[in-house]
Amino acid sequence: MSLKHGLLGLLNYGSMTGYELDKIFRDSLSFFWQAKTSQIYRELDTMECHGWLTSERIIQNDKPNKRVYTITDSGKEELGNWLSMPESDIANAMRVKSAFLMRVFFAGETSTEQSLEMLRTYREKCMEASKGMSAAYDAISKYRTVVGNDEKSKYWRIAALYGDAFIHAGLTWADKAIAVLEEK
Amino acid sequence: MSLKHGLLGLLNYGSMTGYELDKIFRDSLSFFWQAKTSQIYRELDTMECHGWLTSERIIQNDKPNKRVYTITDSGKEELGNWLSMPESDIANAMRVKSAFLMRVFFAGETSTEQSLEMLRTYREKCMEASKGMSAAYDAISKYRTVVGNDEKSKYWRIAALYGDAFIHAGLTWADKAIAVLEEK
DNA sequence: TTCGCCATGTAAAGGGTTACATGATTGT
DNA sequence: ACAATCATGTAACCCTTTACATGGCGAA
């Protein structure tokens, strides 16, 4: 249900095309939500049918034509409603769903060496992701100057801090796990 | 794709009914994978069609009849194949998908007090989840004695350690976030 | 007598991924 | 010459959730 509300949230900052929304998702929101381009276009379509958005087609000569989406009052109302009832999402926030941990759980079926390799690869991915977060911080700073609202960007940074915390936790866990497997 | 492999992994320890598999998922795997009862039954069905499992219906008088599933050689092969190619799951392990963080990101549209309340509720859920983990450890100990294999249960504990690390990271992040919003 | 455990499923809807299709302009 | 950016979508498939349906046994 949250892709719709993420799109509403972004369009609430200003009118945009599907392409631009897709880029923002990739640049700034991808550390807590991923959506395929095709899905974003489809959602925008159904949201327009719901009356949450209107769209206007802009003819361009030098570039492909584009469709600019604008949030309606009904859309703003929906965004407000969603923000006012966070209970179920807070409850679900605790749930990890990780195929990787499923593998760890069943790693006893493989060799210790294979398991260690998996954990070392995971550790490397954590390091990469850690570097990737600075790109997200950059994007947030960029959009802060665009939107020009420090109150809002404060929450963006708080969300990004979660990304850091999560990555860091993964890293120290991997070290611990590797140590357990290496001992004796 | 991993529910199938989780079920294969469990049936590799021994034959079981859908009901028992469902319970194990709930008791021991729920901190990294959740599946609805109805989905488990449906997956077992399609897995049997794939030839990964066979099933035998047991007639009971005092209790409802049941269907016991047994992994086949083809199923063991599939499990082995899956375990031997962890790359894509490691890559995805970094990805959080959290409607809660989506809310945090857009919390600038609500009041500071509302945002604080949300974070405090989240913090409480972390505390609850922390207590919940000890139930998972208990379940793991119980199954260790049943399966009687310390090498395997080692990995179960490593997976559970991730749960702890994740919850702990959430808790300290929440404290930090609350502090940021309370200052000034 | 009410609650929880045992035990299995079906049907429909919703959300997400993969594959495909198009095609000009701008930069290296 | 080649890659990246701009810009939009459709179709099919897969996975997950929600709602519904059934019903006996034992313990408090």
Image: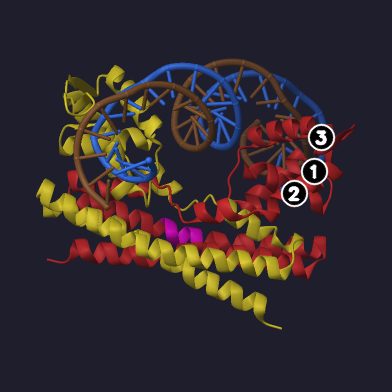
Chain colours: A yellow, B red, C brown, D blue
Q: Are marks 2 and 3 in contact (CB under 8 Å)?
A: no
Q: Do the residues labelled 2 and 1 touch (CB within 8 Å)?
A: yes
Q: In this view, does B71 lie to the left or right of D21?
A: right
Q: Magenta segment, which residues?
A: B125-129
**CA separation in Å, label 2 and label 1:** 6 Å
Task: Check disc 3 and give the amino acid type.
Answer: Gly
Number of callouts: 3
Q: In this view, does A174 lie to the left or right of B180?
A: right
Q: Do the residues at discs 2 and 3 belong to one chain?
A: yes
Q: Do the residues at discs 2 and 1 belong to one chain?
A: yes
Crowdedness near tag 3: few (<14), some (14–19) or many (≥20) residues, C-alpha within 10 Å:
few
Say above or below: A51 vs B160: above
Q: Give the residue at the far left of this rendering.
A: A148
Q: Which of B86 and D3 is in front in this view?
A: D3
Residue B172: % across, % down: 37, 68
Q: Are marks 3 and 1 in contact (CB under 8 Å)?
A: yes
> What residue is shown with label 2?
B79
Q: Earlier in the sequence, mark 2 or mark 3?
A: 3
Task: Check disc 1 and give the amino acid type.
Answer: Gly
Q: Give the residue at the far bottom of this rendering.
A: A184
Image point (50%, 63%), residue name: B130
Q: Nearer the viewer, residue C26 or A12?
A: C26
Image point (35%, 32%), residue name: A40
The quadrant of the image that shows the N terminus of chain A is top left
Crowdedness near tag 1: few (<14), some (14–19) or many (≥20) residues, C-alpha within 10 Å:
many
> What residue is shown with label 3?
B51
Say above or below: B13 vs A121: above
Residue B83: % across, % down: 69, 54
> What residue is shown with label 1?
B75
**Residue A155 in view (yes/no):** no
Quarter holding residue A10: top left
Image point (83%, 34%), residue name: B66
